[in-house]
Every structure is written in C-alpha cells, then in structure tokens.
Amino acid sequence: MVFYDALPNFYRIPIERFGAIRAVLEDVGVPAAGFNALRKSLFVPELADIDEKRLYHCLDVITTLGGSVIDLSANVPIPTGLDPAAFSGRELFRGTFASQEAYLAAAARIKPFAQECARRGIEVSIELHDDGLQDTADNCLKLVALIDEPNVGVNPDIGNWYRVPYQQVGSWREQVVKLAPKTNLWDVKNFRKILVPSEKRYYAWPSDLDDGDMDFREATVILWKAGFRGWVVHEGGTGDRVRSNVRYLSYMRWILDEWIPASEGW
C-alpha cells in the first residue's frame, strides 16, 4: 500500500495515529510500501518553506508506517477557484523553459531531505510529472544529478508525461528507456489521446492499463531488463475502481509470470 498526503486533514493528523494504522496493516499482512508527497513547490519562493516542512512531515509518517520509499515532485501549485473547463484548459508549467536557478533551488531543498531519508533507510523517488520541473525524462535526470545523493532515483510515470495538451518531443518509450536505470518506484496509468487541430491541442482521458495508447507490457519488460524490482502503484483505470484494480492486477501478473519469462531470450 502507498499513502498520499491528499488524505483529508492529513497534516493535522498526529504522527502517532499512523502507528496504529501500521499495526492493522501488519495484522492483515499488507506492507506500507511507500508514500507520495504530492506536488511540492520547492522552487517557488513564497511556497518553498511550507512545502519543505510538509516533506519532513511526510517522512515522519512513512517512517512510522515502515515504508521504504518516498515519492515527490517539484511542481507549481494546483490553481484553485477554476471551473472544470478553465482548469483543464490552463497553461501548464514546462520544466524545459524553467531557469537553472529554479532547478538549483529545488535541488538545494531536496538534497538534505534525501540525506535524512538515507539515515532512516528510505529511498527518494523523483516522479516524472507534468506541470513541474521534472516533466520529461531529461528534466528528471537533470534534477537527480543536481541533488546528487545515492538514495535518489526516479519514478517513470509516463501517464503524467503523455496526458499533456501540448505536443511532446519523443515517445513514451524513450522516456522509459532513459529513466529505467534509475527507477526505484513506478506509478502506472494509461490514457487515450486525440488532437483537435482547430484548438491546436490534445485531449486525453484515462483508460485501463491494458487498453490505452501506451504499451505497458513493453514498458514493464524495459524496466525489468534494467533491473527494476520495486513497487508498482496503479493510479489509473476507469469506472468501478475495484473492478479496474482487479483487471490491473490480472494484467500485471500475466506480464510478470508469463510474458517476461517468454521474452528473456529476446
């Protein structure tokens, strides 16, 4: 199980309560794999201090839960007060056009955080995420290089990369190949996408993992052959969440148990 700081009133929940959650999980044999610290604006001057403080709160939570990896992304904040049409049509932040100072500011905050994580035996995973500094594989690796800590890897969440309204450079496959050697966590979700020429933009909508534009069978093989054996987190699907997760588990189990052994000689 992976926890998120999007839980209602998360930052007001006493850390001790997560110890009780850990006890319940251990009783039923479900490990707390990791934690996703969503969208931390570590390079935005007016928000960096509070989001850095929140990161350490998240670290205390995952330490209490007994997890092994914390996922984070350096993003601009989600705008509030927009109707759904305005929200979906907003212009996204592009890491490619961000200043070097923005990358350095984020890395300066994450580096000591990663060092504290290492002292607790926890890895850090920088998530490939739209609307932030690390919105392409190259930008992920740039940020990781600036942080320069051995326990910092990447999360090649290609769903985040694919769903954007603008034309991407390269392919989802290239993103996976570039990030595979540093992968230590993997969020998975698939999409379908169309181009509307009159609006000069793409529209994307979620699909089940085996039914979208990206081939997660191939992506899994790439990561497996690069040595990734970590946690995979399903964040997508459509319709009934239970049905969608059961379908995902069946698909991923088939890939691991049947397809990967069959592809070993390729």
Image (cartoon, rainbow, N blue to C red):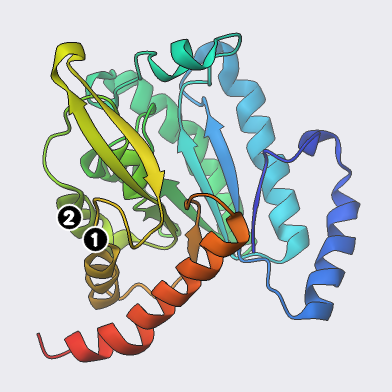
Establish if 117 lies above or below 167.
Answer: below
Q: Residues within 10 Å of mark 1 (few under 14, many from 20)?
A: some
Residue 128 seen in render:
no
Q: Earlier in the sequence, mark 2 or mark 1?
A: 2
Q: Could you tell whether 142 is left or right of 129 in the image?
A: left
Q: Amino acid at mark 2?
A: Arg
Q: Out of 112 and 32, give the one closest to the viewer.
A: 32
Q: Residue furthest front?
A: 239
Marking on residue 173: 2
> Which quarter of the rendering shows the C terminus?
bottom left
Location of residue 153 (image quadrant): bottom left
Marking on residue 250: none
Q: Amino acid at mark 1?
A: Asp
> Which quarter of the rendering shows the N terminus?
bottom right
Q: Position of residue 232 (x, y in %)?
A: 47, 65
Q: Position of residue 161 (x, y in %)?
A: 30, 40
Location of residue 2 (image quadrant): bottom right
Establish if 115 lies above or below 169.
Answer: below
Residue at (79% x, 79% y) in the render: 28
Q: Out of 5 and 257, give the one closest to the viewer.
A: 257
Circle 1 sits on which residue?
A: 215
Q: Position of residue 248 (x, y in %)?
A: 46, 67
Residue 151 seen in render:
yes
| Disc 1 secondary structure class | loop
Location of residue 57 (image quadrant): top right
Q: Could you tell whether 177 is left or right of 92 in the image?
A: left
Q: Could you tell whether 41 is left or right of 138 in the image?
A: right
* Distance between mark 2 and mark 1 Cα atoms: 9 Å
